[in-house]
């Protein structure tokens, strides 16, 4: 069955949106020192600028995914893309820290509604099978490439002025929005939801996710206000328990709990969280190593990490062929083993390492993302009813985002705890200790993914043979 050209145009727009999200996050990370120098922000305020986005994104993702199913995927995508554009621009004009905090929080909320809407537009535009799988692999490769390329682009823009890190996404958002308005259509099979909206469920799950993400962010400095960190986790878990109780009794639940009985979906979400935990933790450590221990510039650091963006080329070309031949489970496990080798090789890092010594790890990480990110997205949405595609997209993106926050926080906490003195040698020792975090996360992900290899019956772990 041939796919209309318009469908591939829709994919191009949605790939642009997910690239925008990835590049936006990565560019800001590079610009943080310049922002602090210009606005005179404290370390706590600077950390809050990053955490605000994570809180908005992680807190509202599940609500965003269900809103796409209930209120319309096109409507949610366009509305929140406009909000993303407006508040990114506000960040560019900020002269005080609180304005940046507000801008980043609302931008994160906008991404939380926009991203699952975009993913579900793909899964409802392309029929399940070969074409959808290829579309999802292209989409996932673009997302991962945004994170890697954003470091380089952010370094270049920061050299012109940190405000361009906010204004560039405004321009890209505007282009995507103008192209999306005439091209995106609401799926013809969509019907207005019967019954009411689960307000109690929405409030409880959003509060739970925000508190849990806040607790994870606070893990970066475990000795700083430990009671508040414990209270955040306790409050989050209590609200999560309340959410489950509400959903069991609600006639129109925000999240149908039965969807979690899908073993492939649960496995994909666990691996997704561990994947991003390992990558973002590793990326943070490499940035510290290159800039603080080796004295490299932001542009040099971004270029050094560029090799990890190899998935941009591999995800839409090599990965579909491998998935077709061997199935999702084997491709995912192979990718995770590549990542495991990459992190193991980097444990031998020294103060005099050449880039040639680092390059194998960077390339293997690119291979990991090419083989894991896209197939996980396929598994998490394959076999899910059309009216719950937004929910499935919200779940997998929540896992990716929560894992990223967890990886950064745990790596930071371990690195700080292991630092015995303010010397390059002590810094290197602490970094090697912290590198065990991404190594362990990837090992756990590999074990979880390998359980899918034992599946014999045709489930979402394996895609159709005619992909």
Image (tube, rainbow, N blue to C red):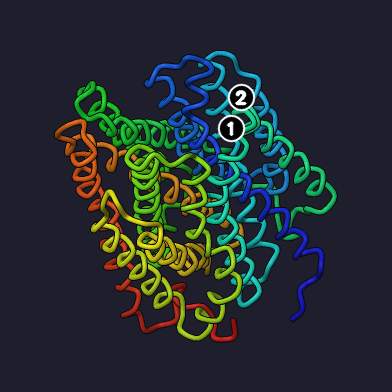
- Can residue 194 be seen here? The reply is no
**Identity of the residue drawn at 48% across and 21% down:** 36
Q: Position of residue 209 (x, y in %)?
A: 40, 37
**Identity of the residue drawn at 40% across and 48% down:** 283
Q: Secondary structure at mark 2?
A: helix
- Asked if the residue at tag 1 contacts the one at tag 2, i.e. Cβ–Cβ closer than 8 Å, the answer is yes
**Identity of the residue drawn at 30% across and 73% down:** 451
Find the distance from the CA under tag 2 to the CA under tag 1.
Answer: 9 Å
* Left or right of residue 213: residue 96: right
Q: State the quadrant of the N terminus.
A: bottom right
Residue annotated with mark 1: 107
**Closer to us: 85 or 66:** 85
Local crowd size for mark 2, using a 10 Å CA cut-off: few (<14), some (14–19), many (≥20)? many
Q: Is residue 146 above or below residue 104?
A: below
Q: How many marks?
A: 2
Q: Position of residue 77 (x, y in %)?
A: 68, 44
Q: Which mark is residue 429?
A: none
Q: To which quarter of the image does residue 243 belong?
A: top left
**Identity of the residue drawn at 70% across and 35% down:** 170
- Can residue 300 be seen here? The reply is yes
* Left or right of residue 432: residue 316: right
Q: Position of residue 176 (x, y in %)?
A: 75, 46
Q: Is residue 307 above or below residue 134?
A: above
* Left or right of residue 226: residue 99: right
Q: Secondary structure at mark 1?
A: helix
Residue annotated with mark 2: 91
């Amino acid at each position: 069955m041939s796919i209309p050209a318009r469908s591939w145009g829709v994919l191009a727009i949605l790939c642009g949106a997910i690239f925008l999200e990835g590049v936006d996050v990565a560019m800001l990370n590079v610009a943080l020192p310049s922002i602090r120098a210009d606005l005179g922000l404290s370390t706590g305020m600077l950390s809050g600028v990053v955490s605000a986005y994570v809180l908005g994104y992680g807190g509202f993702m599940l609500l965003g995914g269900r809103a796409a199913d209930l209120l319309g995927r096109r409507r949610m995508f366009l509305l929140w893309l406009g909000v993303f554009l407006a508040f990114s621009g506000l960040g560019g004009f900020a002269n005080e820290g609180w304005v940046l905090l507000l801008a980043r929080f609302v931008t994160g909320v906008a991404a939380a509604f926009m991203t699952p809407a975009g993913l579900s537009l793909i899964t409802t535009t392309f029929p399940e099978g070969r074409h959808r799988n290829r579309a999802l692999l292209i989409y996932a490769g673009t997302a991962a490439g945004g994170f890697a390329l954003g470091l380089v682009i952010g370094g270049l823009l920061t050299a012109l002025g940190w405000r361009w890190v906010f204004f560039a996404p405004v321009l890209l958002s505007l282009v995507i929005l103008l192209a999306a308005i005439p091209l995106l259509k609401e799926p013809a099979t969509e019907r207005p939801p019967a019954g009411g909206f689960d307000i109690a469920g929405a409030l409880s799950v959003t509060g739970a996710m925000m508190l849990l993400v806040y607790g994870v962010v606070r893990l970066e400095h475990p000795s700083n206000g430990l009671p508040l960190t414990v209270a955040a986790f306790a409050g989050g878990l209590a609200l999560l328990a309340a959410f489950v109780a509400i959903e069991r009794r609600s006639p129109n639940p925000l999240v149908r709990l039965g969807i979690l009985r899908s073993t492939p979906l649960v496995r994909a979400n666990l691996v997704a969280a561990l994947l991003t935990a390992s990558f973002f933790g590793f990326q943070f450590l490499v940035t510290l190593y290159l800039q603080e221990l080796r004295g490299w510039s932001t542009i040099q650091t971004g270029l050094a990490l560029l090799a990890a963006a190899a998935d941009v080329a591999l995800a839409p070309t090599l990965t579909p062929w491998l998935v077709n031949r061997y199935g999702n489970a084997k491709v995912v496990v192979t990718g995770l083993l590549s990542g495991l080798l990459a992190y193991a090789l980097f444990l031998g890092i020294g103060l005099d390492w050449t880039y040639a010594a680092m390059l194998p790890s960077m390339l293997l990480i690119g291979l990991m993302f090419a083989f894991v990110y896209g197939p996980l997205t396929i598994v998490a949405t394959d076999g899910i009813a059309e009216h719950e595609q937004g929910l499935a997209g919200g779940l997998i993106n929540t896992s990716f985002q929560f894992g990223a926050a967890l990886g950064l926080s745990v790596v930071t906490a371990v690195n700080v705890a292991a630092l015995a003195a303010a010397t390059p040698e002590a810094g290197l020792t602490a970094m090697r200790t912290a590198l065990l975090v991404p190594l362990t996360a990837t090992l756990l992900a590999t074990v979880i993914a390998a359980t899918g290899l034992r599946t014999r019956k045709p489930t979402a772990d394996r895609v159709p043979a005619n992909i």
